Amino acid sequence: MNSWSKILLVIFFVFNSFLSFPQSWIRINQLGYLPESVKVAVLISEDDIKIKGFSLCDAETGKVVFRGKAELYNGEYWGMETAARLDFSLFEKPGKYFLKVDDIKSPVFRIAYDVYKGTSDYVLRYMRQQRCGYNPWLKDSCHTFDGFIVDHPAKTGEVIDVKGGWHDASDYLQYLPTSANAVYQMLCAWRKAPEVFGDEYDANGNPGRNGIPDVLDEARWGLDWLLKMNPAKGEMYNQIADDRDHRGFRLPNEDTATYGFGRYRPVYFVTGKPQGIGRYKNRTEGVSSTAGKFASAFALASQIFKDKDDSLSRVLKLKATEAYEFGLTDLGTTQTACYLSPYFYEEDNYTDDLELAAWELFRLAGDSAYLGNADYWGSLEPVTPWIEKDTARHYQFYPFLNMGHVNLALSDTRYASRYRYFMRKALTILNSRRTDDPFQVKVPFIWCSSNYVVAALAMHMFYAEATGDKSFRYQEAALRDWLFGSNPWGTSMICGLPEGGDFPESPHSAFTLHLGVTTEGGLIDGPVYSRIYKSLIGIRLLKPDTYERFNKGMVVYHDDIGDYSTNEPTMDGTACLTLVLSMIEKEGVRQMKRGAEEK
């Protein structure tokens, strides 16, 4: 063995000894904190250490500016010996800081009014990357022959123009439920906080201003597709393509999946009956869930585009009314269809969809009958079932956030108090679990846990807005901070955000595999229970697990292209994130104005 080999061997043993030595970390929100917000970091340690207090230090001088007492929690959930929450909410002075417990230091972070500035527009990058038809990211088009009709009593085999919309995730299927929800959520984001959105892209998603905020351009892209998927009264389509799409990684403009009809992909007609043209069938029981989602998206869009495109607004009003009426003709849920395997979106509830549709029609038309309908449907499901059950099958209760409840709770109608009560009941149930968990994130860690985090965060924010009740503010902050790094892995759940931070660099995506880029702005599925991960077929990590020492608890996460269960970005989750981020951005502006006034 030569001298260089000996040196390398020593380095190897030293490095591995370092990795095996117990370590400690302080997890923070990498974006930073608004001055007036709840501010809590979490310390986790592989060692049994004694913690009494912590210090907040100025990043430039190292001077201690605040001292606090550490609150001990149970680290066993996450495979840790010690865990503590470090609350520095009382400190509000803008600046750059780090936290310190003995010799354990956090990364540097900011306290500032603008820490969320631009984030709402940033996540739209992923929406543009997911566009089908013309894709501005690739500067090319894909799936331009969509599609041929299946399951229609008279039109099966006919060609229908349904080009457009968004790919659902890293495969190229397109679903009405997720797309309609995405349109609705982005329009809600605009309605709640129009001042935070910019105009840097045109309607096709190419760089260049067109006088329309980018979030409305993106919502309109999806809206135009929804109109194609509902070409006539009582004629609705729920899905393009099926699991024959799952042929490995390829770019959308190089898609090689075939469905026995040349370059055309199947377009599934809404039948209200179990569907599946292959061996397997779903458990569809009616049309209400899909029709309700069409109706709520159309009704809200009609309101928002009235001053921008009156003729479109009138068409959307008619479509919304027809869609709601169609939803009442065959009560039940429409699930997505499969072909090769018995895996599909298993939506089982529809009253939330009819509730939201009726509410938006009430806002649109002013007819009190719709308001009564909204209350009727809403009363049938006081709490979204995934909250009560602490689990769900894949997309079983969708959307994850009941926006009908939110809108009624925020309203000045006679029903408002009922829905504020429903929301408080849901939050109480949710937050009663795992009270000794240091991260205080109480969602079920099933597939798409990040989507559940966003839904729970939005519900906390809307409840506080509707009631002024701040009793859940720490749980709200925990959900917010989890998304940006206050989690066992210290990583953001949004690709590329924040710049220079720890975020998913190897998402499960053909863009990453073939082009070497991360899917900027995409919200990844997020961590799952280790038992779920171990049960999945076809997962193979493509590189050493950089988070291995944090994957010894009840939940795992891998920043790896091969992990489709935790590291795949999704279109609908990202769209829902626009609503949450826009509200937080708006709060930053409010705090800044208030701070300026006090000076």
Image (cartoon, helix red, strand yellow):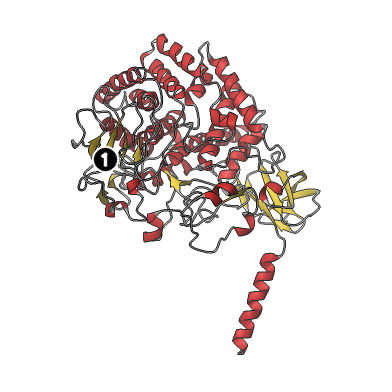
Q: Secondary structure at mark 1?
A: strand
Image position of 458 (left or right of 437): left
Three-letter code for the amino acid on which mark 1 is drawn: Pro
Name above or below for residue 225 compared with residue 123: above
Q: Which residue is mark 1?
A: 266
Furthest toward the bottom, the residue is 2
In this view, the residue in front, 373 or 246, is 246
Q: Residues within 10 Å of mark 1 (few under 14, many from 20)?
A: many
Residue 332: where, in percent of width, then height? 41, 23
Answer left or right for 553 relative to 126: right
**Residue 150 in the image, given as x and y percentages of width and height:** 25, 35
- Residue at the image position 37 percent from the left and 60 percent from the top: 514
The answer to which quarter of the image holds residue 160 is top left
Instruction: Give how far across and how far down residue 82 sits, in percent.
Output: 75, 51
Q: Residue at x 48, y 26 (%)?
A: 403
Quarter that holds the N terminus: bottom right
> Measured from the top left, where is residue 496 in percent x and y?
47, 52
Image quadrant where one finds the C terminus: top right
Figure check: 399 above or below 570? above
Residue found at x 56% / y 22%:
466
Observer-nearest residue: 266 or 49?
266
State the image quarter where residue 25 is shown.
Answer: bottom right
Most foreground residue, 443 or 127: 443
146 horizontally vs 485: left or right: left
Q: Residue furthest front?
A: 279
The answer to whether residue 274 of the structure is visible from this angle is yes
Total numbered badges shown on the rendered structure? 1
Q: Is residue 35 visible?
A: no
Residue pictured at 59% horizontal, 49% vertical: 530
